[in-house]
Amino acid sequence: MFDNIYKNKKILITGNTGFKGSWLSAWLLKLEAKIIGISKDIPTNPSIFETLNLEQEIKFYREDIRNLDKIIEIISLEKPDFLFHLAAQPIVSTSYINPIETISSNVMGTANILEALRISNHKCTAIIITSDKAYDNIEQVWGYKETDHLGGKDIYSGSKGGAELIIKSYFHSFFKNSNSNIKLAIGRAGNVIGGGDWAKDRIVVDCMIAWSKGEIVEIRSPQATRPWQHVLEPLSGYLLLGQKLYQNDILHGEAFNFGPRAEQNHTVKELLTELSQYWHFNSVEEAYKITNNIYFHEAGLLKLNCDKALFDLKWLPTLEYKKTIKFTSEWYYDFYKRSISMFDKTIQQISEYENIAKEKGLKWTE
Ligand SMILES: NC(=O)c1ccc[n+]([C@@H]2O[C@H](COP(=O)([O-])OP(=O)(O)OC[C@H]3O[C@@H](n4cnc5c(N)ncnc54)[C@H](O)[C@@H]3O)[C@@H](O)[C@H]2O)c1
């Protein structure tokens, strides 16, 4: 996998206690990497980080990325071979409540990571994660390309667009220079689902919590359509980007979209019907009820054009829709209803994901 590039390497993951950071840690542990994490807290309760007992497997610094001195100290001391920067305030609704915290973590936090890399200047390949929301959403129906305008009307989106501007200026001011040992690229992806997410305002999470308590979920917008992408999809993109950037200078400073295929688009009703199959209900009426069925205009649904990732990295999504839902729903069912090791379950899903990708002939599996 990934040309064995991560084996025995020191990998720093910021935001390691979060949803994506925990899955990335588990995958890199499977690839026999040594993991160092920086996060300011454990963002949810329950949490995937604690459920997988990841603190036993990694070196964890509980630090805030807004503390520049501390971040410089850790990066200069640890000198990681790779850095995946995921730490952020990632919830749009929270960005309305705590705008300054969102901006300081997402923009200044990213600047601090880049500054610490500049000062340390050891050989390091850094993948900086922003978001599809970094794009200025002009409600076009076709996918956004990496060269499209950045921006964002809400604070979260603006903070991710702001982070992108800072990354670009650090790249041109410092890292592009031949004296720099830092290689950097940007990964942009949209919302993802998968076992172990307990963030608020997410339909899958709300369902899993309700069903674990035997409650029926109420849905108000059954026809709302979303692309349902598994968390392992962008992670395979970030890992592949890290590998290619490590092996080849040509990707230095480049940004890549990692999005789902159009067939992953399904309505909320279809999603709940599919998810409920793994909870052994007698009928869907036990799982959800539709309390309102108002058609509404889907403002601002943003699609990514991933041709660049296909062309330069040979990256494609791996899972079909049904498998995405199976992975997700089974993970939570096992967490709530069976006493098994969720670390083993997670590794088993990563292995299955790798095997499906291998059968499809995806290059990163070599
Ligand atoms: N989950 C998604 O659907 C999604 C979609 C697009 C982009 N992203 C991006 O991916 C990244 C990870 O998202 P996630 O869903 O895993 O988020 P999460 O909320 O599960 O985890 C966030 C992590 O960042 C850490 N963090 C937040 N502020 C920090 C600070 N100031 N200092 C140190 N650590 C801090 C938290 O402790 C936690 O470890 C974020 O950059 C997010 O914007 C996520």
Image: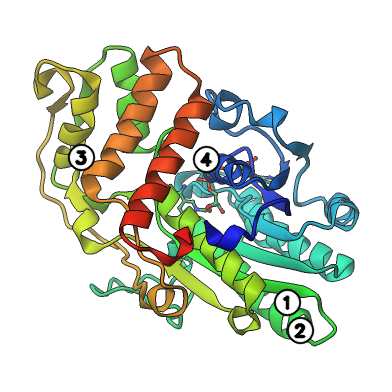
Q: Is residue 131 something that shows in the picture?
A: no
Dot 1 or dot 3: first in sequence order is 1
Disc 1 from disc 3: Cα separation: 41 Å
For label 3, the SS is helix
Task: Give the mark nearest the N terminus, 4 or 3.
Answer: 4
Q: Which mark is residue 170?
A: 1
The amino acid on which the numbered mark 1 sits, given as a three-letter code, is Tyr
Q: Can you give x and y, in whole percent of width and height, for residue 62 in the image?
A: 77, 37
Q: Which residue is mark 3?
A: 271
Relative horizontal placement of residue 146, taking residue 74 as reference (left or right): left
* Label of residue 173 in the image: 2
Task: Report if the CB atoms under discs 1 and 2 are less than 8 Å apart.
Answer: yes
Mark 3 residue type = Leu
| Position above or below: 232 against 303 | above
Residue at 27 percent across and 62 percent down: it is: 261
- Label 2 secondary element: helix
Q: Secondary structure at mark 4?
A: helix
In three-dimensional space, the C-alpha distance between marks 4 and 1, rounded to whole angstroms, equals 27 Å
